[in-house]
Image: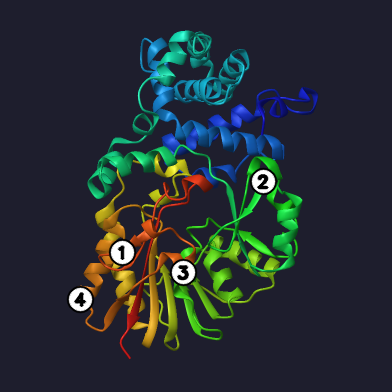
Amino acid sequence: MSQDAATAAPETRAPHADRREALRLLSAALERGRALSEAAAEAPADLSPADRARALSLAAETLRRLGQADAVIRRFARRAPPPPARDALRLAATEIHGLGAPAHAAADGAVAATKARPGGDRAAGFVNAVARKLAEPEGAAAWAAGDPARINAPGWLWGRLSSAYGKAAAHAICAAHLTRPRLDMSLADADGAWAERLLQAFPDAAARLPTGGLRLDPAAVGAVSALPGFEAGAWWVQDAAAAVPARLLAPPRGARTLDLCAAPGGKTLQLAAAGAEVTALDVSAARLDRLRENLARTALSAEIVCADALDWTPAAPFEAILLDAPCSAIGTARRHPDVLRRRDAPDIKGLSALQDALLDRAWTWLAPGGRLVYATCSLLPEEGEARVRAFLDRRPDAQAAPAAPADLGLPDAAAAQDPPGLRLRPDLWPERGGMDGFYAALIVKDP
């Protein structure tokens, strides 16, 4: 949404409502470790849809550019700003230097947003004094100084990515994290009429992806629920990388298939649309409600089970299992920049232990000759390749099957070799706008 559109018709909206909500979202993510999407669901009831959308966009962009925003603030603040002043100034710096907002509007918004927070009146004067200076040449110079990919990457992330892939690849990944993502769709019928309707409705903003879905420019298409085919259940929103594990599993029609850790359900929809007999298991009842809604909208069917996978036992073995295991989720930082800011370095050791436990348990539910895909939306080998190698070492009846990226519409660079699998990174497909980071490996059980 453009700055002019967001600030139009002031008589129909509360002044700076979007900025006040954006500051609330930043505080939720940075001070309380909450996901932006969860915090956004608790927006005030009287906040307009346009202000909700702009607030979420402002907060997300501020999190992407946090290093640059802090560099600007350091030029003008003689002391470290306390919350909520710090986050209000981060928001203003990002608006002015990252989004091209008028300096006076961003400064006024920062002050108004600060006053709306508990205890904000005491900090409003400080915010006002600093915010008025952010647009000065010194501020622009601070924003532009250095390498954005490095400045905006948390130190722990840069270190882990450099160790895993080398500094050049780490730089490319962190640069991709600064690019606002497109809107990806998986189609219930990839060759159906709804895909053509979308392409015709948005000839300059929609394109087919080699992986079979569609990619749209969200700034050009408006509200997702108003797009052609939404009410008809012809598609669902799903990043192109997130759609790969189900396609790699490729269960036969009618195959008894488990989607383990299924919510919010994009992979369940894929498997059901492909004709599998799907059981969707997840521990979160609230997230499974979203899956039920999407199943109803798409007229697809799946058995839904709300249970802890470490306690649950199926009535019979499955022919195919998709385990999208809980992980650090840093591969989704393009879409969810809060995952890099909500905490320090994630507890990879604890997550790896859980991933191992889920893999071992799922294997006992897989029928002889069956197929299992292990996947994580992580960029860290400790949550991907290392987990599969360790699993193969302790399971003599398990074999990793080769994965051919070209067969799935992916570039050759997506191939993982040790063990065979797929390593998707945000810097792949730069000409198309990138993709989320994912790891996926197909493991076959001996007959």
Could you tell me which residue is drawn at 42 percent across and 87 percent down? 317
Q: Quadrant of residue 8?
A: top right
Which residue lies under the disc numbered 1?
354
Name the element at disc 2: loop
Q: Are marks 1 and 3 in contact (CB under 8 Å)?
A: no
Which residue lies under the disc numbered 4?
394
Q: Earlier in the sequence, mark 3 or mark 4?
A: 4
Q: Is residue 27 above or below residue 285?
A: above
For mark 4, does the 10 Å Cα neighbourhood hold few (<14), some (14 to 19), or many (20 or more) residues?
A: few
Q: Earlier in the sequence, mark 1 or mark 3?
A: 1
Query: Left or right: 99 with respect to 437?
Result: right
Query: Left or right: 429 with respect to 393?
Result: right
Q: Amino acid at mark 1?
A: Leu
Q: Earlier in the sequence, mark 4 or mark 2?
A: 2
Q: Earlier in the sequence, mark 2 or mark 3?
A: 2
Q: Amino acid at mark 4?
A: Arg
Could you tell me which residue is drawn at 43 percent across and 9 percent down? 138
Name the element at disc 3: helix
- Seen from the viewer's position, the closer of residues 293 and 407 is 407
Q: Earlier in the sequence, mark 1 or mark 2?
A: 2
Which residue lies under the disc numbered 2?
205
Query: Left or right: 402 with respect to 9?
Result: left
The alpha-carbon separation of the residues under discs 3 and 4 comes to: 30 Å
Name the element at disc 1: helix
Q: Is residue 164 above or below residue 61?
A: below
In the rendered image, residue 442, in percent from the top left (x then y), is placed at: 37, 73
| Residue 47 appearing in the image | no
Which residue lies under the disc numbered 3?
407
The alpha-carbon separation of the residues under discs 1 and 3 comes to: 31 Å
Select label 4 or label 2 by which is in front. Answer: 2
In the rendered image, residue 157, in percent from the top left (x then y), is placed at: 31, 42
